[in-house]
Amino acid sequence: MVSYEHRLLQQKDMNLFTKTKGIFKNSIVFVWVLLCTFWAQGQDDDWQVLFNGDDLRGWTTKIHHYDVGDNYGDTFRVEDSIIKVRYDQYEGDFNDRYAHLYYDEPFSHFHLSMEYRFLGEVHPGAPVFVEKNSGVMYHSEDPRKMLKEQNWPISVEMQFLAGVEEGKSRPTGNMCSPGTDVVYQGKIDPRHCISSSSKTYFGDQWVKAELIVRGDSVVTHIINGETVLEYTKPQLGRTGVVKGARPEMDKKGELLKEGFIALQSEGQPIDFRRIKIKNLKGCMDPKAKNYKKYFIASDPDSCVYE
């Protein structure tokens, strides 16, 4: 028979064990959360901020009918850490003053992230299709080489749309192809725009858009964390949409391996913020100081050693 004192001692040992086990378990959880936090911070450190929140340093404007660098009517402006697209200083109607704000550094393999929201009404004289319509261009030609009367850059667009009629679907994160083509579902798609599978967003809510581009290979569109469209082989194509382009850009079928990123202005007020990019091309030698596991394209010249 086990004595009362012995049972009490066993109970105390069990309580101590349970308490110690709980402390150990909580310690593991704490360490795991701490490691995840450090990992996430490390990942965040690998993002390059493209917009400094104060001004348009590092960006170049090209507006149809104007020379490169002429930001007519203060079309692109910075307020409250937001790049705002506005037309309140325009004289007369819109007059096809399609505009783009280009980041000055080209990229080939990258993960781009930003947030956008639509506001206000379309400027008088702008075409009907621009209502709640904008986007970001990639693999674009250099704006400094574009002709003054070229309406759109030859590029590929991740198109942003918002709902305009309740009950009517209008997805965002679509693909449009000014002067270009892409391969979709195994063949070159003849459509100028390919709709994504995203839901429709109404009003002036912020929407997060991400674009993962793997050179001239696979391209992925992500809206609010969900993959909504994927296609391959961006290339020079039909030039019908683009007017006034340089003749040397007429090279249908030539794969687009890199280019410039540009925010779009088509007559609809829109805001952009939190614009950042993770370059997926870099040193892939594990012995180098700047080696990153997530690089998918090699750039040996960028390697830095001890």
Image (cartoon, grey):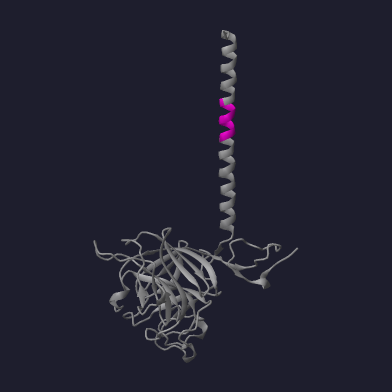
How far across and how far down the image is residue 57, in percent?
54, 71
Q: Is residue 246 left or right of residue 159?
A: right
Quarter of the picture containing the N terminus is top right
Residue at the farthest bottom position: 247
**Percent position of residue 260, x then y:** 51, 76
Q: Residue furthest right?
A: 306
* Residue 94 in picture, x, y percent from top left: 33, 79
Image position of 49 with respect to 261: above or below: above
Residue 269 in which image quadrant: bottom left
Residue extending farthest to the front is 1
Q: Is residue 216 visible?
A: yes
Magenta segment: does it hold 12?
A: no
Q: Which residues are magenta?
A: 18-25
From the viewer's side, name the closer residue of 113 and 77: 113
Q: Magenta region's main secondary structure?
A: helix
How many numbered marks, from 0 up?
A: 0
Side of 199 relative to 258 (left or right):
left
Q: Quadrant of the C terminus?
A: bottom right
Magenta segment includes 20: yes
Is there any visible trace of residue 123 in the rendered image? no
Residue closest to the eye, 137 or 76 = 137
Residue for point 45% across, 61% down: 80
Residue positioned 64% across, 71% down in the render? 299
**Figure check: 114 above or below 66:** above
User: At which x and y percent is residue 149?
Assistant: 42, 88
